[in-house]
Image (cartoon, grey):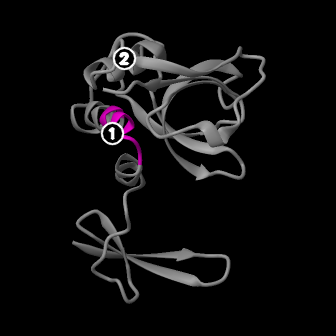
Amino acid sequence: MVSMLIVSSCSRKVIKVVEDNKVVTDNKNKNKPDPDPIIEAENNTSEAGKAVLKIGRKMALEEKVIFKGSCWNYINEVFKRAGYGTNKKVVYKSVKKGPYVDISKIQPGDWLYYVNHSYGGVEHSGIFVYWKDYKNKIGVTLSYGGEHRNEPGRYRSYDLRSVYYITRPGAK
C-alpha cells in the first residue's frame, strides 16, 4: 500500500511516500527508507550499549513484555537479559537536586536517573537511546511507566537537563 504525506518544513514543502508502513522520501531517493533512529543508535554505540538497546527493543516492541514493578525494575530486567545484571559501572553519581551531568557524557545504552519534568518532577529512570534535540537536552529513552499499568516499555522524548545518575553496562 502506498500513501502520500505532505509535511511542511521551514523552508520548503517535503513530500513523503509511505510504502508498507515505511516512510520513503519522494525525491531522488524514493526507494531508500528513512533510517530508524532506534536502530541507528544501536549500530553507533559500544558493543555493551548495543546489547542493552537490542534487548530493550525486543522486550518493548517485539515481545511487548508487561513487567509488574517500577521503571527501575524494568530497566534492571533489560540489563539482566542483556547479560549486564551485575556487570555495570556507575559513571556519574549525584542526587535528585543536582548537580547534573554534562550531557556530552551520556551514551546510548546508559541507564539514566533523571527528574521527569513532564510528570510532576518525580524521579524516573530509562535507557538512553538517542538525542532528539541535543541543544535543548531532549533525548529519547526506553522507559517503563510502572504504577501497575498494563503496558510494555515505551520510547519517549524526555527533557534530560536534570540527569543525576548514570549506570553503564560493563565490559565483557
Return the residue at label 1: 47
On the image, which quarter does residue 98 sit in?
top right
Q: Inspect the magenta stretch and tell me whether residue 47 lies in it.
A: yes
Residue depicted at x 26% and y 75%: 2
Image quadrant occupied by the C terminus: top left
Kindly indicate whether the residue at mark 2 contacts the one at mark 1 (C-beta within 8 angstroms): no
Q: Position of residue 95 (x, y in %)?
A: 71, 14
Which is nearer the eye, 165 or 20? Answer: 165
Q: Residues within 10 Å of mark 2 (few under 14, many from 20)?
A: few
On the image, which quarter does residue 144 sit in?
top left
Give the tally of numbered discs.
2
Return the residue at label 2: 87
Dominant secondary-structure state across the stretch colored magenta: helix
> Horizontal placement of 153 versus 164: left or right?
left
Which is nearer the eye, 34 or 10? Answer: 34
Compared to residue 3, the image places residue 67 above or below, namely above
Q: Residues within 10 Å of mark 1 (few under 14, many from 20)?
A: some
**1 or 2: tag closer to the N-terminus:** 1
Q: Find the magenta span and give its range.
A: 45-52
Q: CA distance from mark 1 to mark 2?
A: 14 Å
